[in-house]
Image (cartoon, coloured by chain):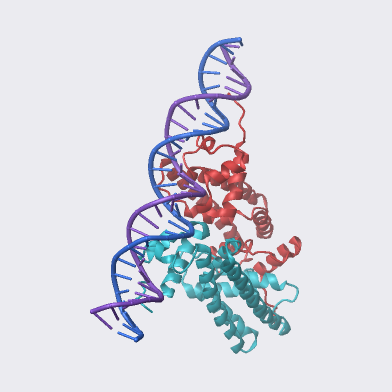
Chain colours: A cyan, B red, C blue, D purple
Amino acid sequence: MARERKFSMNELFSAAKELLLIHGYEGFTFSLLADRLNVSRGALYKYYENKEELITDYMIDELNQFFTDLQKIEHCEGFDAQFDFLMNLIFAMPEVQQLIKIAVQIPKNVNDKVRENKAHLDKLHLDMYKHLQSFIKLGKEEKKLKAHIANELILGFIFQTIAIPNHFGIPHSEWVASIKEIIGHGMFTNN
Amino acid sequence: MARERKFSMNELFSAAKELLLIHGYEGFTFSLLADRLNVSRGALYKYYENKEELITDYMIDELNQFFTDLQKIEHCEGFDAQFDFLMNLIFAMPEVQQLIKIAVQIPKNVNDKVRENKAHLDKLHLDMYKHLQSFIKLGKEEKKLKAHIANELILGFIFQTIAIPNHFGIPHSEWVASIKEIIGHGMFTNN
DNA sequence: CTTCAAAGTGACACAAGTGTTACCTTCATT
DNA sequence: AATGAAGGTAACACTTGTGTCACTTTGAAG
């Protein structure tokens, strides 16, 4: 190395994340990012040719982290424990879903690096999905999950719920407990 | 009138809607919209000073329509019928939730018209919320809805579910039926 | 058939984002 | 202490979006 960097890769990624969540893919610019990092715009081009490369690189990092955590689900014995583990994980990283949506918007025909990164993201996504499939399968084998509901929908439902805006500031523990209850047993009484 | 317009207000709004859903608020431009309507960009400035005015105007139109439909919920007797009505309505206008999210991003300090429009949108939003509150209240009075789950969450849950992506193309009727079941009775079996 | 107001156009000046490059700064290595 | 590779800057040329305005086109009303 020759000179100390003014920002670490972690700082860059976390700044990118913030800006992406606030402004969305089309509103994300190198100028915004450079300002946030107190660096000139040109400096960013030392690392990335364009915003697509940067964003996809960051997303791979984020998804890898999520996937690594997710794989620990296998340390949990039985469906109930795994369900709890998954809910906690999802609530700990609530932005992941939103970021995946943004990832879809990135055009892949920018250059080879971006194409490669997008392929990598697709693979990560698919691997995650396969992993979760076996979680669902376990639930159905243990007769804990209703067999006639499509796996797709079960997963979608679980992931979607974390995006419900808690606007009125209901305490987090109550919020999570209620969501678990609705997912598991619904919002209707059993009359 | 002096000359036939090349586009109706409906065409303008529906073009705006498409573009907003594809590109998001920051990616939405007058150039895109003008192209889509086969009109010069300048023509749009005859009607709106900037995109914020246009977007908020469109959103008021969209929300008004939704709200008008929603009010028909009172023609349904009892909670069960109202629940069904609401689910059908939400599935018929699945973009409304996404559009509301976009509306939040619009800065209100552009000019008076935009401030006014945003206030109008807030009022519509609040009115809708109040209306739905009484639906929830009814459900709890009839002891159909679990009393200990916050109204906020119940509403959030119902609205959020329509955003679950049906990526694998499960037939719509099965999809809707399963979602109603999960919302009502959960995805767990009753062992 | 003239009038004129609404509808639409194209060009201008400006602002903001992009990608590149010549150049300066820093600091570990020698 | 000199060197050079990596980090960083600022300016340039270019593209895209914005808001405005003088101008043309259209068509109903007089």
**Res D24 quadrant in image:** top right
Quadrant of residue A191 within the rendered picture: bottom right
Q: Is residue A59 left or right of residue D6?
A: right
- The picture quadrant where one finds residue A103 is bottom right
From what the image shows, is residue A107 above or below residue B10?
Answer: below
Q: In front here: B160 or A18?
A: A18
Q: Foreground residue, B111 or A99?
A: A99
Q: Is residue B26 above or below residue A163?
A: above
The percent position of residue B153, horizontal first and vertical second, equals: 55, 65
Judge whether residue A182 can be spotted in this image: no
x then y, percent, for residue B26: 50, 53
Q: Residue at x 37, y 63 (%)?
A: A40
Q: Quadrant of the C terminus of chain B?
A: bottom right
**Residue B131 placement (x, y as % from top left):** 56, 53
Count of marks overlaid on the render: 0
Is B41 on the left or on the right of B92, as rendered? left
Rendered-image quadrant of the N terminus of chain B: top right
Q: Position of residue B84 (x, y in %)?
A: 69, 58
Task: Please name whichever residue, B191 or B119, is drawn nearer the observer in this view of the structure.
Answer: B119
Q: Along the line of sight, which residue is nearer the eye, A82 or B65?
A: A82
Give the residue displayed 62% in from the left and 33% down from the top. Answer: B6
**Is residue A54 visible to the viewer in this orientation of the structure?**
yes
Instruction: Give me the residue at 57% from left, 67% from top.
Output: A114
| Residue drawn at x 52%, y 52% as measured from the top left | B27
